[in-house]
Amino acid sequence: MGVYANSSVRVYVNGMRVYEDVIVKNERTYIPLRAVSEALGANVVWDQASGSAFITFTEEDAVSKVVSDVSPSVVTIVGNYAGTGTTVQYNNPTMHGSGVVYKSNGYIITNAHVVEDIKNLTVVLNDGTSIPGQVLYSDKDADLAIVKIDKLGLKPITMADKSTILSGKTAIAIGTPISLSMRNTVTKGIVCGNGVSLPDSYYKLIQTDATVNPGNSGGPLLNSTGELIGINSSKYASLTIDNVAFAIPVDTVQYAISQFEKYGYIKRPNLDVSLEQSWEAKIGLPTTKGITVKKSNISMLQTGDHITYVNDVPVHSIADWNEAIKATYDGTKLKIGYTRNGVFSRVEISC
Amino acid sequence: MKSFVRILAAVLVLTMCLAFVPVLADEGTVEISFCLGDDTIVINGTGVAVEKPYVVGDGVTLVPLRVITEAFGATVEWINETRTVNLTYPDVNIVLQIGNPVAEVNGQAAKLLSPPELTPAGFTMVPLRFISENFGAKVTYDSETGRITVVKENSQKGNTIQGAIDSEMIGDSYYGWCMKNPTNMIMDDRTFDGLYTSFSYDDENYIVVYVDLLTEDFDFDADFASEKSMVQGYTLVKADKKTTGDGQKYMHIQAKDKVEFLETRKIVNDKYIYTVYGYYQNENEEVKKECMDVVASFINFYDSAKAYDLSDVKAETRLFEVPEMGLSISVPANFGMVSSEDSENDFSFYEMTTDDNVSTLHIQIFSKSHIGTAKDLAQKDYESNRRVLNETITDFKDIVVEKQYKSFAAYQYSYDIVSEYYNLHTRDVFFELGEYVYNIAVTIDLTDYSETFADKILNSVEAKLIDSSEVGILLRNDYESEGTYQVTFGDAILDVPNSYEKVESGNTVYMQNIISAVGIACQISPSAKKVTYDSVKKDFEEIEKSYQKLTGYEVGARTKIKYIGDKKYISFQLVETNDDGKTYLEVYGYVKNGVLYVINVIYPEIAYSEANRLEVSNILGSLSFK
């Protein structure tokens, strides 16, 4: 019992260490008020006259604190267009997108389309430092790529738990839209929808109304505590459409990273079968019709078979199929549940 | 008792660290290698005796702290009271505490899979992977040998981003010109053959450079007058022309109005006409001045010391690439490209020459599912050409044969066209790759080249498998449609095959065969009074006589009655010969109810074949009236 400074007690606010002396008294831990409040993003005003401390904390403060905490993890990826032709060689056009540091020793995640056809790739950190970068891995279908730079001690992003992504919650996008002079600018909206399947997207996406523009691609979509919920990748742009943007959800990002680290590419089953979805699935209407085998070069499946389960996951669209494989494929085989001439069977196929 | 031991342990740890010479990495490379349970670890090539590494928890390898500090050259600070280790490495600060699964990297909390430990002997053991990765090294485990390797490579040099070309001048070494580099503009377009290059500051301020072949009929003075008249709505600022002692001709025209400023500079030597055209807005003084400087600096000489070369001619050829089709071919440098917008599977090139005969190169790609096999297509085109081409001047070398070129095996046929005017060799080559059929036709001017020239072009072709899911179906614009349609002029009706495309102009209905270029023009001959076959005969004979007097015209067949089926025509034939070749012109007249219906048929020499003449005969024979 007693009052003593305990330098072995460490206090972290949202993952960042607060470097102040900690006092333990009567089994309670005390730390200077200002240090913790400001670490949270709150404003502290000490009124000498009344001997009181006033702490104010608004949602705005929380958001701007998240932005300043997370910005060191957001980078801009710039380069020259690697096309051929005299015009390209003369103009040397530049292109750019955004990216997120996910490992402190220089690993950055971004969209595959940002780094496709890029040369002289340069990563610009939040503090303005420019470092050359290399594309290590890339997958066009997932639209994700990993860029590596030779820098240590970067601040990595924290990944959110996928189950916490809910429609209506705050979504914050940080990136570099349109011009490099808007490096690491912020927009805010909400998660409008989760698990949206678009016709030309391999996996399901998060829909948001946080304003994103060309250049935001590859940058993070964050929740209100600064965790990564998605990677901004595309939007609908037309005279009749506003505020509809899409991000690749965090679980797909984590899946891609682990596949890249394990195999160097995203390992998908080598099933020599072409599949077709119902017209309902094509237009996005929920259906229980399953997906049909259009053409099969293996004996276990035939044209016309209706597949309704993959590894015990129900599938009724091509997006469902891709998601089921992402969630369950072990690298060696698939268990397929299908109906042929009204009879349901299961088969295990090595692929 | 306790504290005594603790201090002793701390001292021991420190002395352990100091007792041995650190085996530091050289300039950033680090390599650590060992097996679990070894008491020697190879650090940067040197074996070092250590406390044995071991595994805890879920496969976390712990190594003596010294391994890390020696290998990476990190500095260590040990804080005894809290049993904390501070590791400092360029850019990275790691804080670890014995027994604490939360470490700190640059002040940020990081969860460890297993906390650092202190061995009974007092050695600090830290997680290998966590520290190595944060220090930028890669840890790999060989499950067969049980060997763990940590490697950190030297920094990789990347290339910095480039801006636009900023040399003082730019030019084209093949056509021989250069000018000041318009650094305030971007290059919008440059054709494959380099004949056209355009730069713009924006939509309303631009410069274009054209190169044209000088033809015999180019009249410099007439051209100057024409350029002047083009700007007649503007105030003329300058209109200079001159010829220099070496025969080169120059002109410079500048004109303006309140808003715009235009200028044209032309230089003509014995081979090319160089045109530089500038268009600017007066309101943007700075841009206008820079552009005018660029235009004024243009010379028809390539300064290799100062000018960036826009020309991509290498070894007398330009590499034509279509990445989406996986196709590349070396096109002779003196071939221009026929521009066809939106063409993804059809590319045409022609020899830039003032000769009568022009060599050409035509490349097309089609889906096999729509066009058939290469062999079938070769046979089909062979038969079609045999029908369409004038047999008296065309010599078909062979029927369809197989031939091996450098990167493909093909079916081909070839023919020579030799007449007073023509001297050409054509080779029509067909090959397959994946789901597509490629058709490359090379025609060469035999007066300038030999057949090996065609071989050289065909042997430079490289074709890679096309991904049909990306490219899709490629069709050929064939007039497959058998069948006819009706053409009317006045009360007359003709049945014309679909291969003839119709164009109407005033009172004349004109049709041209897309494949053979045979043309048919129909009209009603105006006349105050009624005509008869006899009166028409007299008129036609007059026309014959007047043409005979002109140079370049001969009468091929005198005016006479000719029955085509049961239709009574009166006709004559003229043969016109000029620099462009020979043309057969046949005039057919039909009288009905006192009105003369005239049908003129124009055959280019090359299309004057039996099959084409039969086709025209059928058209004439189909004449009917409403």
Image (cartoon, coloured by chain):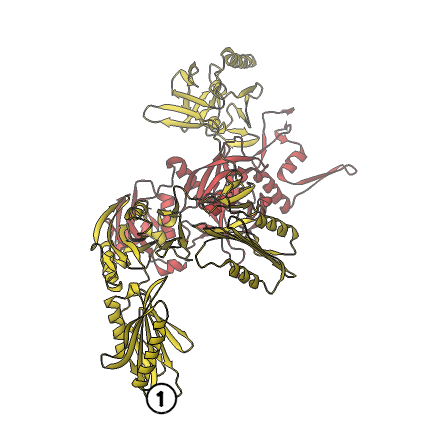
Chain colours: A red, B yellow
Q: Position of residue B131 (x, y in %)?
A: 48, 26
Question: In x, y percent, where is residue B264?
Answer: 56, 56
Tell me: B226 left or right of B574: right
- The quarter holding residue B260 reads bottom right
Quarter of the figure with residue B354: bottom left
Q: Amino acid at mark 1?
A: Lys
Q: Is residue A58 visible?
A: yes
Q: Residues within 10 Å of mark 1 (few under 14, many from 20)?
A: few
Q: How many marks?
A: 1
Front-most of B483 and B31?
Answer: B483
Q: Position of residue B273 (x, y in %)?
A: 48, 53
- Is A77 in front, or is B581? B581
**Quadrant location of the N terminus of chain B in the rendered image:** top right
- Badge 1: chain ID: B
Up-down: is A133 above or below B190?
Answer: above
Compare residues B533 and B68 and report the one nearer the observer.
Answer: B533
Tag 1 residue: B530
- Between A297 and B405, the one lying in front of the other is B405
Q: Is residue B195 visible?
A: no
Residue at point 55% right, 41% down?
B166
